[in-house]
Amino acid sequence: MDIVGMTRRRGSAARINVQLMLRRLQLTSGLVMLTYLFLHLVNHALGIWSLELAGHGLVLALRLWRSAPGTIALYGAASVHFALALHTIYGRRHWVLPPAEWIRLWAGLSLPLLLIRHAVTTRLASSLYGFEPNYERVIVVLLTSGTQGLQLALLAPGWIHGCLGLWFRLRHHAWARRFRPALLILFVMLPLLSAAGFIHMMGAVEGAGHRLPPVDAALVVHQAALNGARHTLVTLYLAVIAGTLIVGQLRNALERRRLRRGSAGSRLLARSASCEQDVLE
């Protein structure tokens, strides 16, 4: 019995250690992506002052995220966070969640759409076709394609998901509760300032009564290939999410079926034992 008890305790301790490790990975990868979003929003907000200032910020951001450590950190964090999200979706036994959790889930699943668009329109376009983004070029592409609203909307879900996830981790600390008003102001105001900066930059690029600058020729030639790559990645992402959800629900249904069979078997054994007892009596 002692051996059995020790084995169970070791197994329980191992599961707890695995859960702690997964939570740390989730927090670390989430902080990396939240930092990326924070800097992205701040960079847009600099456009309130001038397009040039935002351009200088973009140069610094590109140096950071295109460096070897930055690339590994950003895309590695995104991959780890996505894998952990799939693990959570597959392992969830029920979907009765409070509203805040539903919002965080929706926002988190929307974040990769931003990263896919970013990776294709900037990183892939730069690596394959030599397109070097600056705010003027990016805004011209968005204005000519009519997707400037989408660019602003895609930043919001990731910011909401990251801030909610961080708050769920910090809310148990007294210091975090004391700073809650300041954190709430930052949570609300930064996206608004970012949107204001981006709108100001769009106005600066369009100019009052002036024609838009021409779109980068290399990007025009390869735009169809970039759009195809983006659509393929988005489709693959949505298929993986849906597949994981379906497989998880099938697993849950099989487990419930086994439990019902086990319960029915236990009741049958109990009835048999009762009948035998009646006969003996």
Image (tube, rainbow, N blue to C red):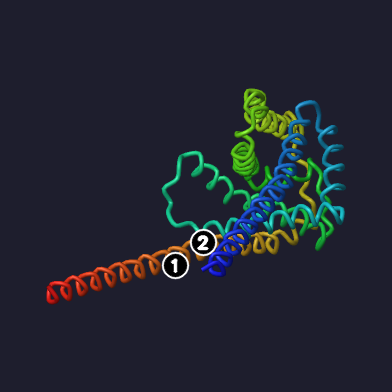
Q: Nearer the viewer, residue 278 or 39?
A: 278
Residue 147 appears left or right of 61: left
Q: Which residue is mark 2?
A: 90
Residue 87 horizontal/vertical position (percent): 57, 60
Q: Nearer the viewer, residue 223 or 185?
A: 185
Callout 2 secondary element: helix
Total count of labels? 2
Q: Amino acid at mark 1?
A: Arg
Residue 22 appears left or right of 140: left
Q: Residue at x 64, y 32 (%)?
A: 173
Q: Quadrant location of residue 136?
A: top right
- Spatial CA distance of label 2 from label 1 is 9 Å
Mark sitting on residue 251:
1
Q: Quadrant of the C terminus?
A: bottom left
Residue 187 horizontal/vertical position (percent): 64, 31
Residue 121 horizontal/vertical position (percent): 73, 54
